[in-house]
Image (cartoon, rainbow, N blue to C red):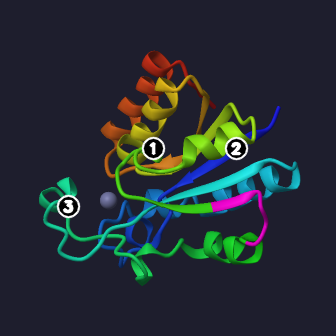
Amino acid sequence: MTKALLIIDYTNDFVDDKGALTCGKPAQELEDYIVKTAQDFYSNGDYVILPTDTHFENDVFHPEHKLFPPHNIAGTWGQKLYGKLDEWYQEHQADEKVYQFAKNRYSAFQNTNLENFLRERGIKDLYLVGVCTDICVLHTAIGGYNLNYQLTILKDGVATFTDNGQEWALEHFKNSLGATVE
Ligand code: ZN
C-alpha cells in the first residue's frame, strides 16, 4: 500500500538555536533520523510530504498572534527547512512524490489541500515526524484520525519543548487516536 511520510514544521524557527520558537536540542537531534526516513520512503516509491507553517508579519487576526512570538514568516530564513533536511529537499523537490505546502494552522489538514492530495493518490497510511509533538504533530494526527487515516507516529522523529508534553502526546496518539507509536 502506498504510504506517506509527513515531516511537520522541521524548520529553522522551530529547530535551530537561533530560531524564533525553537524546541532546541531535542529537535536538532532528530535531523539524521528524519533525513534517513525521508530517503527510505523516497527510495521505496512512497510519498514525502512537508506541511510547513507559514505566517505573515503583524497578522493580528491570526489566533497564534497572541500566543507565540512571530515565527515561520513566509519567505524568511526561519521558515526554511532545517539543516540536512533542507539539502535533501532541494535535491528532491522536483519529484512528484515530494510535496511541500504552506499551512496556517497547527493541523496540516486545516485550510489545505492535503486531504485531496492523499485521496487522489489512494494514500491511507500516514507516518508522522517533526515538531512540535504536542502542537502541530498532535493536531495533524487528530485531523488524520477524524478522516479515518491509519496513523503511525515515529517516536524517534518527533520532539517538543517539554518532556511532559512529549510523554503526554505519545500516550494520547496511542490511547485516544489509535495510532501506532514506534
Ligand atoms: Zn505557527
- Which stretch appears magenta? 94-99
Query: Foreground mark, 3 or 2?
Result: 2
Quadrant showing the N terminus: top right
Q: What SS does tag 3 mark?
A: loop
Q: Is residue 145 visible?
A: yes
Q: In this view, does 36 lie above or below 80?
A: above
Q: Name the residue under label 2.
A: 4
Estimate the x, y position of residue 118 in percent, counting from the top left: 66, 41
Estimate the x, y position of residue 13 in percent, counting from the top left: 38, 71
Distance from Cα at disc 3 to Cα at disc 2: 30 Å
Q: Which mark is residue 68?
A: 3
Q: What SS does tag 2 mark?
A: strand
Residue 95 sits inside the magenta stretch: yes
Q: Earlier in the sequence, mark 2 or mark 1?
A: 2
Q: In this view, does 116 lie above or below 59?
A: above
Q: Quadrant of ligand 1?
A: bottom left
Three-letter amino acid code at the position of disc 1: Val
Q: Residue at x 69, y 32 (%)?
A: 125
Does the residue tagged 2 have its C-beta within 8 Å of any atom of ligand 1? Answer: no
Disc 3 vs disc 2: Cβ atoms closer than 8 Å?
no
Estimate the x, y position of residue 126 in percent, counting from the top left: 64, 37
Q: In this view, does 55 lie above or below 107?
A: below
Give neighbour class at mark 2: few <14, some 14-19, many 20+ (Cα, 10 Å).
many
Q: Mark 1 points at which residue?
A: 137
Q: Which residue is drawn at 34% across and 51% down?
A: 105
Give neighbour class at mark 1: few <14, some 14-19, many 20+ (Cα, 10 Å).
many
Three-letter amino acid code at the position of disc 2: Ala
Q: Which residue is drawn at 36% across and 57% down?
A: 104
State the image quarter where residue 16 is shown.
Answer: bottom left
Seen from the viewer's position, the closer of residues 68 and 168 is 68
- Decide if residue 119 is on the left or right side of residue 166: right
